[in-house]
Protein backbone atom coordinates (compact mmCIF):
# COMPACT_ATOMS: atom_id res chain seq x y z
CA UNK A 1 0.00 0.00 0.00
CA UNK A 2 1.29 3.47 -0.81
CA UNK A 3 1.55 6.17 1.83
CA UNK A 4 -1.21 8.11 0.20
CA UNK A 5 -3.54 5.07 0.37
CA UNK A 6 -2.58 4.63 4.01
CA UNK A 7 -3.35 8.26 4.71
CA UNK A 8 -6.77 7.79 3.16
CA UNK A 9 -7.39 4.76 5.38
CA UNK A 10 -6.41 6.75 8.46
CA UNK A 11 -8.55 9.70 7.41
CA UNK A 12 -11.41 7.20 7.57
CA UNK A 13 -10.40 6.05 11.06
CA UNK A 14 -9.98 9.62 12.28
CA UNK A 15 -13.47 10.54 11.03
CA UNK A 16 -14.72 9.19 14.38
CA UNK A 17 -12.91 11.93 16.32
CA UNK A 18 -15.59 14.59 16.62
CA UNK A 19 -18.22 12.12 17.89
CA UNK A 20 -15.75 10.55 20.37
CA UNK A 21 -14.77 13.97 21.69
CA UNK A 22 -18.43 14.83 22.30
CA UNK A 23 -18.84 11.63 24.31
CA UNK A 24 -16.29 12.75 26.90
CA UNK A 25 -19.27 14.60 28.40
CA UNK A 26 -20.48 11.20 29.64
CA UNK A 27 -17.48 10.95 31.96
CA UNK A 28 -18.57 11.88 35.48
CA UNK A 29 -15.50 12.68 37.54
CA UNK A 30 -11.71 12.67 37.08
CA UNK A 31 -9.20 13.23 39.88
CA UNK A 32 -5.80 14.61 38.83
CA UNK A 33 -3.10 14.23 41.48
CA UNK A 34 -0.54 15.09 42.76
CA UNK A 35 1.63 17.73 41.12
CA UNK A 36 0.58 21.13 39.84
CA UNK A 37 2.96 24.06 39.53
CA UNK A 38 3.73 27.14 37.47
CA UNK A 39 5.75 26.58 34.30
CA UNK A 40 7.97 29.48 33.20
CA UNK A 41 8.41 28.73 29.52
CA UNK A 42 11.23 30.20 27.49
CA UNK A 43 12.47 29.45 23.97
CA UNK A 44 16.26 29.26 23.97
CA UNK A 45 18.09 29.74 20.68
CA UNK A 46 21.54 28.35 19.87
CA UNK A 47 23.07 31.81 20.16
CA UNK A 48 21.43 32.47 23.53
CA UNK A 49 22.77 29.13 24.68
CA UNK A 50 26.29 30.11 23.60
CA UNK A 51 25.95 33.20 25.83
CA UNK A 52 24.84 31.05 28.76
CA UNK A 53 27.80 28.71 28.23
CA UNK A 54 30.13 31.70 28.30
CA UNK A 55 28.38 33.29 31.31
CA UNK A 56 28.56 30.15 33.45
CA UNK A 57 32.08 29.22 32.37
CA UNK A 58 30.95 25.71 31.49
CA UNK A 59 33.99 23.93 30.14
CA UNK A 60 34.09 21.83 27.03
CA UNK A 61 34.88 18.60 28.88
CA UNK A 62 31.72 18.97 30.95
CA UNK A 63 29.48 18.78 27.87
CA UNK A 64 29.47 15.03 27.59
CA UNK A 65 29.36 14.50 31.30
CA UNK A 66 25.81 13.46 32.18
CA UNK A 67 26.31 12.93 35.89
CA UNK A 68 25.01 14.03 38.23
CA UNK A 69 21.65 14.73 36.62
CA UNK A 70 21.05 17.41 39.22
CA UNK A 71 21.50 21.16 39.32
CA UNK A 72 23.77 22.54 42.02
CA UNK A 73 25.18 25.49 40.08
CA UNK A 74 24.21 27.59 37.04
CA UNK A 75 26.75 25.60 35.01
CA UNK A 76 24.83 22.39 35.83
CA UNK A 77 21.67 23.95 34.46
CA UNK A 78 23.41 24.82 31.19
CA UNK A 79 25.00 21.34 31.07
CA UNK A 80 21.55 19.72 31.25
CA UNK A 81 20.19 22.07 28.60
CA UNK A 82 23.09 21.26 26.30
CA UNK A 83 22.66 17.54 26.74
CA UNK A 84 18.97 17.76 25.73
CA UNK A 85 19.64 20.22 22.89
CA UNK A 86 22.45 18.15 21.37
CA UNK A 87 20.41 14.93 21.44
CA UNK A 88 16.94 16.42 20.87
CA UNK A 89 15.70 14.73 24.05
CA UNK A 90 13.45 15.72 26.98
CA UNK A 91 14.68 15.54 30.56
CA UNK A 92 13.88 17.16 33.88
CA UNK A 93 16.55 17.87 36.51
CA UNK A 94 16.00 19.23 39.98
CA UNK A 95 17.50 22.52 41.15
CA UNK A 96 18.87 21.79 44.59
CA UNK A 97 19.89 25.27 45.59
CA UNK A 98 17.67 28.33 45.91
CA UNK A 99 20.50 30.56 44.65
CA UNK A 100 20.43 28.76 41.30
CA UNK A 101 16.68 29.35 41.16
CA UNK A 102 17.32 33.07 41.64
CA UNK A 103 20.04 32.96 38.96
CA UNK A 104 17.61 31.34 36.49
CA UNK A 105 14.98 34.00 37.26
CA UNK A 106 17.46 36.82 36.67
CA UNK A 107 19.51 35.41 33.79
CA UNK A 108 17.29 32.99 31.90
CA UNK A 109 13.93 34.72 32.38
CA UNK A 110 10.72 33.52 30.74
CA UNK A 111 8.46 34.27 27.77
CA UNK A 112 5.23 33.17 29.46
CA UNK A 113 3.83 31.48 32.55
CA UNK A 114 1.46 28.56 32.13
CA UNK A 115 -0.09 25.78 34.17
CA UNK A 116 2.42 23.03 34.79
CA UNK A 117 2.78 19.67 36.43
CA UNK A 118 1.00 16.58 35.15
CA UNK A 119 -1.97 17.06 37.49
CA UNK A 120 -2.37 20.73 36.58
CA UNK A 121 -2.10 20.12 32.84
CA UNK A 122 -4.36 17.07 32.89
CA UNK A 123 -6.97 18.92 34.97
CA UNK A 124 -7.17 21.78 32.46
CA UNK A 125 -7.36 19.40 29.50
CA UNK A 126 -10.03 17.19 31.10
CA UNK A 127 -12.20 20.16 32.09
CA UNK A 128 -11.96 21.70 28.62
CA UNK A 129 -12.79 18.38 26.95
CA UNK A 130 -16.04 18.30 28.93
CA UNK A 131 -15.56 15.87 31.84
CA UNK A 132 -18.41 16.76 34.21
CA UNK A 133 -16.29 17.34 37.32
CA UNK A 134 -12.49 17.51 37.59
CA UNK A 135 -10.77 17.61 40.98
CA UNK A 136 -7.14 18.65 41.05
CA UNK A 137 -4.75 18.17 43.96
CA UNK A 138 -2.43 21.12 44.56
CA UNK A 139 0.40 21.09 47.08
CA UNK A 140 0.56 24.85 46.70
CA UNK A 141 -2.08 27.14 45.20
CA UNK A 142 -1.31 30.83 45.43
CA UNK A 143 -3.50 33.18 43.36
CA UNK A 144 -0.88 33.42 40.58
CA UNK A 145 -1.12 29.71 40.00
CA UNK A 146 -4.89 29.44 40.49
CA UNK A 147 -5.38 31.94 37.63
CA UNK A 148 -3.61 29.50 35.33
CA UNK A 149 -6.42 27.02 35.81
CA UNK A 150 -9.10 27.52 33.18
CA UNK A 151 -12.02 29.64 34.28
CA UNK A 152 -14.45 26.70 34.28
CA UNK A 153 -16.98 25.59 36.92
CA UNK A 154 -16.19 21.89 36.35
CA UNK A 155 -12.59 22.32 37.54
CA UNK A 156 -12.23 22.34 41.33
CA UNK A 157 -9.61 22.12 44.03
CA UNK A 158 -9.49 22.66 47.79
CA UNK A 159 -9.40 26.25 49.02
CA UNK A 160 -7.95 27.62 52.26
CA UNK A 161 -11.17 26.63 54.08
CA UNK A 162 -10.53 22.99 53.01
CA UNK A 163 -13.70 22.99 50.89
CA UNK A 164 -13.86 22.28 47.16
CA UNK A 165 -14.20 25.42 45.07
CA UNK A 166 -13.64 26.53 41.49
CA UNK A 167 -9.85 26.18 41.13
CA UNK A 168 -9.48 29.39 39.11
CA UNK A 169 -10.83 31.51 41.98
CA UNK A 170 -8.91 29.95 44.88
CA UNK A 171 -6.39 31.99 46.83
CA UNK A 172 -4.21 30.06 49.26
CA UNK A 173 -1.41 31.61 51.17
CA UNK A 174 1.28 29.35 49.61
CA UNK A 175 4.55 30.13 47.82
CA UNK A 176 4.60 29.80 44.04
CA UNK A 177 6.42 26.72 42.72
CA UNK A 178 8.08 27.55 39.40
CA UNK A 179 9.66 25.15 36.92
CA UNK A 180 11.80 26.44 34.07
CA UNK A 181 10.86 24.97 30.73
CA UNK A 182 13.65 25.62 28.26
CA UNK A 183 12.41 24.83 24.77
CA UNK A 184 14.66 24.57 21.73
CA UNK A 185 14.14 24.03 18.01
CA UNK A 186 15.32 21.17 15.84
CA UNK A 187 17.90 22.37 13.28
CA UNK A 188 19.12 25.20 15.50
CA UNK A 189 22.91 25.43 15.83
CA UNK A 190 24.97 26.17 18.91
CA UNK A 191 28.35 27.57 17.87
CA UNK A 192 31.08 26.96 20.40
CA UNK A 193 34.81 27.50 20.05
CA UNK A 194 36.03 24.59 17.91
CA UNK A 195 32.67 22.84 17.75
CA UNK A 196 29.21 23.33 16.26
CA UNK A 197 26.32 21.45 17.81
CA UNK A 198 23.13 20.98 15.75
CA UNK A 199 19.92 20.13 17.56
CA UNK A 200 18.35 17.05 15.92
CA UNK A 201 14.77 17.57 17.17
CA UNK A 202 12.64 20.22 18.87
CA UNK A 203 12.28 19.38 22.55
CA UNK A 204 12.68 20.79 26.05
CA UNK A 205 14.78 20.67 29.18
CA UNK A 206 13.07 21.29 32.52
CA UNK A 207 14.91 22.78 35.49
CA UNK A 208 12.72 22.46 38.56
CA UNK A 209 12.81 24.24 41.89
CA UNK A 210 9.85 23.00 43.88
CA UNK A 211 10.22 22.31 47.60
CA UNK A 212 6.45 21.76 47.99
CA UNK A 213 5.99 19.06 45.38
CA UNK A 214 9.40 17.55 46.07
CA UNK A 215 8.12 16.11 49.33
CA UNK A 216 4.84 14.84 47.82
CA UNK A 217 2.60 15.56 50.76
CA UNK A 218 -1.01 14.60 50.28
CA UNK A 219 -3.36 17.46 51.15
CA UNK A 220 -5.65 16.00 53.82
CA UNK A 221 -8.66 18.10 52.87
CA UNK A 222 -8.35 16.94 49.28
CA UNK A 223 -7.92 13.37 50.42
CA UNK A 224 -11.16 13.58 52.41
CA UNK A 225 -13.10 15.09 49.52
CA UNK A 226 -11.79 12.71 46.86
CA UNK A 227 -12.57 9.64 48.92
CA UNK A 228 -16.16 10.71 49.57
CA UNK A 229 -17.21 11.19 45.94
CA UNK A 230 -17.71 8.78 43.05
CA UNK A 231 -14.71 8.89 40.69
CA UNK A 232 -14.31 7.36 37.21
CA UNK A 233 -10.63 7.97 36.62
CA UNK A 234 -7.62 8.96 38.70
CA UNK A 235 -4.60 10.27 36.84
CA UNK A 236 -1.58 9.93 39.09
CA UNK A 237 1.82 11.53 38.79
CA UNK A 238 4.40 13.54 40.68
CA UNK A 239 6.61 10.70 41.89
CA UNK A 240 9.31 11.71 39.44
CA UNK A 241 10.12 14.74 41.58
CA UNK A 242 11.13 12.61 44.57
CA UNK A 243 14.65 11.67 45.54
CA UNK A 244 15.86 8.70 47.56
CA UNK A 245 16.58 10.97 50.53
CA UNK A 246 14.41 14.06 50.60
CA UNK A 247 15.63 17.54 51.48
CA UNK A 248 13.80 17.17 54.85
CA UNK A 249 15.64 13.91 55.56
CA UNK A 250 12.62 11.67 54.83
CA UNK A 251 12.63 8.83 52.31
CA UNK A 252 11.17 9.25 48.83
CA UNK A 253 9.95 5.65 48.93
CA UNK A 254 7.86 6.34 52.05
CA UNK A 255 6.11 9.25 50.32
CA UNK A 256 5.32 7.07 47.33
CA UNK A 257 3.83 4.44 49.62
CA UNK A 258 1.85 6.96 51.68
CA UNK A 259 0.33 8.56 48.58
CA UNK A 260 -0.50 5.15 47.11
CA UNK A 261 -2.38 4.34 50.30
CA UNK A 262 -4.44 7.49 49.83
CA UNK A 263 -5.14 6.53 46.23
CA UNK A 264 -6.08 2.98 47.09
CA UNK A 265 -8.51 4.41 49.66
CA UNK A 266 -10.21 6.42 46.89
CA UNK A 267 -10.42 3.27 44.88
CA UNK A 268 -11.83 1.27 47.80
CA UNK A 269 -14.92 3.50 47.74
CA UNK A 270 -14.96 3.41 43.90
CA UNK A 271 -14.10 -0.13 42.84
CA UNK A 272 -14.72 0.64 39.14
CA UNK A 273 -12.50 3.68 39.10
CA UNK A 274 -9.57 3.35 36.71
CA UNK A 275 -6.11 4.24 38.00
CA UNK A 276 -3.64 5.65 35.52
CA UNK A 277 -0.02 6.45 36.35
CA UNK A 278 2.00 8.89 34.25
CA UNK A 279 5.65 7.95 34.73
CA UNK A 280 7.45 11.22 33.78
CA UNK A 281 11.19 11.78 33.71
CA UNK A 282 12.43 10.24 36.98
CA UNK A 283 16.12 10.88 37.44
CA UNK A 284 16.58 9.27 40.85
CA UNK A 285 17.22 5.58 40.21
CA UNK A 286 16.11 4.38 43.64
CA UNK A 287 12.80 6.23 43.30
CA UNK A 288 12.40 4.94 39.75
CA UNK A 289 12.87 1.39 40.99
CA UNK A 290 10.38 1.95 43.77
CA UNK A 291 7.80 3.20 41.25
CA UNK A 292 8.43 0.19 39.02
CA UNK A 293 8.01 -2.29 41.86
CA UNK A 294 5.20 -0.41 43.69
CA UNK A 295 2.69 1.87 41.94
CA UNK A 296 3.37 0.39 38.49
CA UNK A 297 2.14 -2.98 39.75
CA UNK A 298 -0.99 -1.56 41.38
CA UNK A 299 -2.44 0.71 38.69
CA UNK A 300 -4.62 -0.25 35.70
CA UNK A 301 -2.79 1.84 33.16
CA UNK A 302 0.61 3.47 32.65
CA UNK A 303 1.64 6.28 30.30
CA UNK A 304 5.22 6.96 29.23
CA UNK A 305 7.41 8.33 26.46
CA UNK A 306 10.43 6.70 24.78
CA UNK A 307 12.97 8.01 27.30
CA UNK A 308 10.90 7.02 30.32
CA UNK A 309 10.38 3.55 28.87
CA UNK A 310 14.11 3.04 28.37
CA UNK A 311 14.85 4.41 31.86
CA UNK A 312 12.56 1.75 33.37
CA UNK A 313 13.93 -0.96 31.11
CA UNK A 314 17.43 -0.15 32.35
CA UNK A 315 16.37 -1.34 35.80
CA UNK A 316 15.50 -4.77 34.43
CA UNK A 317 19.06 -5.43 33.36
CA UNK A 318 18.32 -6.13 29.69
CA UNK A 319 21.38 -4.23 28.49
CA UNK A 320 21.17 -5.37 24.89
CA UNK A 321 17.60 -4.14 24.43
CA UNK A 322 18.44 -0.91 26.26
CA UNK A 323 21.34 -0.35 23.85
CA UNK A 324 19.12 -1.08 20.84
CA UNK A 325 16.44 1.36 22.03
CA UNK A 326 19.04 3.98 22.89
CA UNK A 327 20.59 3.66 19.45
CA UNK A 328 17.25 4.14 17.76
CA UNK A 329 13.99 4.50 19.68
CA UNK A 330 11.95 3.05 16.81
CA UNK A 331 8.47 1.62 17.26
CA UNK A 332 9.61 -1.97 16.65
CA UNK A 333 12.30 -1.66 19.32
CA UNK A 334 9.98 0.15 21.70
CA UNK A 335 7.37 -2.59 21.34
CA UNK A 336 9.86 -5.09 22.73
CA UNK A 337 10.62 -2.73 25.60
CA UNK A 338 6.92 -2.25 26.35
CA UNK A 339 6.29 -5.98 26.32
CA UNK A 340 9.15 -6.48 28.80
CA UNK A 341 7.58 -3.90 31.14
CA UNK A 342 4.10 -5.34 30.57
CA UNK A 343 5.28 -8.77 31.69
CA UNK A 344 7.37 -7.48 34.56
CA UNK A 345 4.75 -5.20 36.14
CA UNK A 346 1.63 -7.17 35.29
CA UNK A 347 0.04 -3.79 34.62
CA UNK A 348 -2.84 -4.52 32.22
CA UNK A 349 -2.38 -1.47 29.98
CA UNK A 350 0.73 0.42 28.92
CA UNK A 351 0.60 3.35 26.54
CA UNK A 352 3.68 4.81 24.91
CA UNK A 353 3.47 8.26 23.37
CA UNK A 354 6.37 8.56 20.99
CA UNK A 355 7.19 10.97 18.21
CA UNK A 356 4.65 10.28 15.45
CA UNK A 357 3.00 7.24 17.01
CA UNK A 358 1.02 6.19 20.08
CA UNK A 359 1.34 2.56 20.99
CA UNK A 360 -0.79 0.71 23.54
CA UNK A 361 -0.18 -2.84 24.74
CA UNK A 362 -2.95 -4.29 26.86
CA UNK A 363 -4.19 -7.49 28.37
CA UNK A 364 -6.82 -9.35 26.40
CA UNK A 365 -10.28 -8.58 27.70
CA UNK A 366 -9.20 -5.27 29.29
CA UNK A 367 -12.26 -3.17 30.04
CA UNK A 368 -11.43 -0.68 27.26
CA UNK A 369 -11.75 -2.57 23.98
CA UNK A 370 -9.05 -2.19 21.28
CA UNK A 371 -11.50 -0.26 19.07
CA UNK A 372 -12.39 2.12 21.93
CA UNK A 373 -8.68 2.57 22.65
CA UNK A 374 -8.09 3.55 19.05
CA UNK A 375 -10.91 6.09 19.20
CA UNK A 376 -9.43 7.57 22.37
CA UNK A 377 -5.92 7.69 20.93
CA UNK A 378 -7.16 9.43 17.78
CA UNK A 379 -8.90 12.10 19.81
CA UNK A 380 -5.69 12.49 21.82
CA UNK A 381 -3.68 12.94 18.62
CA UNK A 382 -5.99 15.69 17.35
CA UNK A 383 -6.11 17.46 20.72
CA UNK A 384 -2.31 17.22 21.16
CA UNK A 385 -1.76 18.65 17.67
CA UNK A 386 -4.20 21.44 18.55
CA UNK A 387 -2.16 22.18 21.65
CA UNK A 388 1.14 22.13 19.74
CA UNK A 389 -0.22 24.24 16.89
CA UNK A 390 -2.08 26.89 18.86
CA UNK A 391 0.21 26.94 21.91
CA UNK A 392 -2.46 26.24 24.52
CA UNK A 393 -5.73 24.46 25.11
CA UNK A 394 -7.71 27.41 26.35
CA UNK A 395 -10.93 27.26 24.44
CA UNK A 396 -12.81 24.45 22.78
CA UNK A 397 -11.95 25.55 19.25
CA UNK A 398 -8.31 24.51 19.88
CA UNK A 399 -9.43 20.93 20.55
CA UNK A 400 -10.41 20.29 16.93
CA UNK A 401 -7.94 22.72 15.32
CA UNK A 402 -6.06 19.82 13.67
CA UNK A 403 -8.97 17.59 12.74
CA UNK A 404 -8.64 17.98 8.96
CA UNK A 405 -4.94 17.18 8.89
CA UNK A 406 -3.44 13.93 7.69
CA UNK A 407 -1.39 11.63 9.86
CA UNK A 408 2.36 12.20 9.56
CA UNK A 409 4.84 10.38 7.30
CA UNK A 410 6.98 9.69 10.35
CA UNK A 411 4.01 8.07 12.06
CA UNK A 412 3.37 5.83 9.07
CA UNK A 413 7.04 4.83 8.89
CA UNK A 414 6.94 3.84 12.56
CA UNK A 415 3.66 1.99 12.09
CA UNK A 416 5.14 0.00 9.18
CA UNK A 417 8.16 -0.93 11.27
CA UNK A 418 5.84 -2.09 13.98
CA UNK A 419 3.74 -4.12 11.54
CA UNK A 420 6.89 -5.76 10.16
CA UNK A 421 8.00 -6.77 13.65
CA UNK A 422 4.55 -8.10 14.49
CA UNK A 423 4.59 -10.03 11.21
CA UNK A 424 7.91 -11.67 12.07
CA UNK A 425 6.81 -12.65 15.54
CA UNK A 426 3.14 -13.55 15.13
CA UNK A 427 2.24 -13.54 11.44
CA UNK A 428 0.51 -11.13 9.10
CA UNK A 429 -1.87 -8.50 10.42
CA UNK A 430 -3.70 -5.46 9.09
CA UNK A 431 -2.44 -3.15 11.84
CA UNK A 432 -1.13 -0.63 9.27
CA UNK A 433 -4.67 0.23 8.24
CA UNK A 434 -6.73 -0.67 11.32
CA UNK A 435 -4.25 0.18 14.10
CA UNK A 436 -5.23 -3.02 15.89
CA UNK A 437 -3.47 -6.35 16.32
CA UNK A 438 -5.02 -9.11 18.40
CA UNK A 439 -2.00 -10.89 19.81
CA UNK A 440 -1.73 -14.20 21.69
CA UNK A 441 -2.22 -12.93 25.25
CA UNK A 442 -2.30 -9.18 24.61
CA UNK A 443 -3.67 -6.69 22.10
CA UNK A 444 -1.70 -3.93 20.42
CA UNK A 445 -3.25 -0.66 19.36
CA UNK A 446 -1.13 1.77 17.35
CA UNK A 447 -2.18 5.15 15.99
CA UNK A 448 -0.01 7.31 13.72
CA UNK A 449 -0.33 10.89 14.92
CA UNK A 450 -0.63 14.31 13.38
CA UNK A 451 2.61 16.28 13.60
CA UNK A 452 2.68 20.05 13.54
CA UNK A 453 5.66 21.40 11.64
CA UNK A 454 6.41 24.40 13.83
CA UNK A 455 4.95 23.58 17.23
CA UNK A 456 4.33 26.60 19.45
CA UNK A 457 4.85 24.37 22.47
CA UNK A 458 5.73 20.81 23.38
CA UNK A 459 5.55 20.74 27.14
CA UNK A 460 2.81 18.70 28.77
CA UNK A 461 2.07 16.76 25.63
CA UNK A 462 2.40 13.31 27.19
CA UNK A 463 0.06 14.14 30.06
CA UNK A 464 -2.57 15.46 27.66
CA UNK A 465 -2.25 12.45 25.36
CA UNK A 466 -2.55 9.85 28.14
CA UNK A 467 -5.55 11.41 29.86
CA UNK A 468 -7.47 12.27 26.70
CA UNK A 469 -6.82 8.75 25.33
CA UNK A 470 -8.57 7.32 28.38
CA UNK A 471 -11.61 9.59 28.70
CA UNK A 472 -12.24 9.56 24.93
CA UNK A 473 -11.96 5.76 24.72
CA UNK A 474 -15.69 5.15 24.50
C1 LIG B 1 6.88 17.85 34.84
C2 LIG B 1 7.40 19.21 35.17
C3 LIG B 1 6.37 20.26 34.94
C4 LIG B 1 5.79 20.14 33.54
C5 LIG B 1 5.35 18.73 33.26
C6 LIG B 1 4.96 18.58 31.82
O1 LIG B 1 5.91 17.51 35.77
O2 LIG B 1 7.81 19.25 36.52
O3 LIG B 1 6.94 21.51 35.12
O4 LIG B 1 4.71 20.99 33.40
O5 LIG B 1 6.37 17.82 33.53
O6 LIG B 1 4.72 17.29 31.48
Image (spheres, helix red, strand yellow):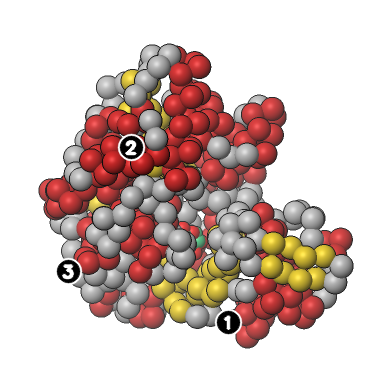
In-image side of 473 versus 84 (left or right): left
Q: Which comes before the other along the chain, label 1 or label 3?
A: 1
The answer to whether 453 is drawn above or below residue 280 in the figure is below
Residue under the image location 36 percent in, 47 percent down: 407
In the picture, measured across the screen, residue 429 lies left or right of residue 18, that is right
**462 vs 184, nearest the viewer:** 184
Residue carrying label 2: 5
| Label 1 near ligand 1 (CB < 8 Å) | no
Distance (Cα) linking label 2 and label 3: 44 Å
Label 1 and label 3: CA atoms lie apart by: 33 Å
Viewer-nearest residue: 118 or 90: 90
Q: CA distance from mark 1 to mark 2?
A: 47 Å
- Residue visible at 33% across and 61% down? 386
Q: Which residue is mark 1?
A: 109
Quarter of the image for the N terminus: give it.
top left
Mark 1 or mark 2, which is nearer to you?
A: 2
Labelled pair 2, 3 in contact (Cβ < 8 Å): no
**Residue under the point 54% across and 43% down:** 306
Residue 285, above or below 319: below
What secondary structure is found at the residue carrying circle 1? loop
Q: Residues within 10 Å of mark 1 (few under 14, many from 20)?
A: some
Q: Quadrant of residue 156?
A: bottom left
SS label for mark 3 = loop
Residue carrying label 3: 153
Amino acid sequence: MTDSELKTAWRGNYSEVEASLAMIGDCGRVVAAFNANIDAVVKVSGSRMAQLVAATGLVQTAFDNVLPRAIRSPADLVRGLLRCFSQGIAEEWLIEDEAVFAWARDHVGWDRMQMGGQAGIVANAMALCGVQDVLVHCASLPADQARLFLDLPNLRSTGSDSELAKAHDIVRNDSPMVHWILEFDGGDVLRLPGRDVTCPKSNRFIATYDPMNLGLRVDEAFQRQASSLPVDLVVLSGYHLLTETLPDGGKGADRVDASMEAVLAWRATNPDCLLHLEIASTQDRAVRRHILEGPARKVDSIGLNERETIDLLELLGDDELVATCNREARADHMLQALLRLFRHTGCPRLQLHMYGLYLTVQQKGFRISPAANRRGMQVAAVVAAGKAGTGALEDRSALLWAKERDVSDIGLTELKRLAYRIGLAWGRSDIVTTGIFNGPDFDIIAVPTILVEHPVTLVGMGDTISSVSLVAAR
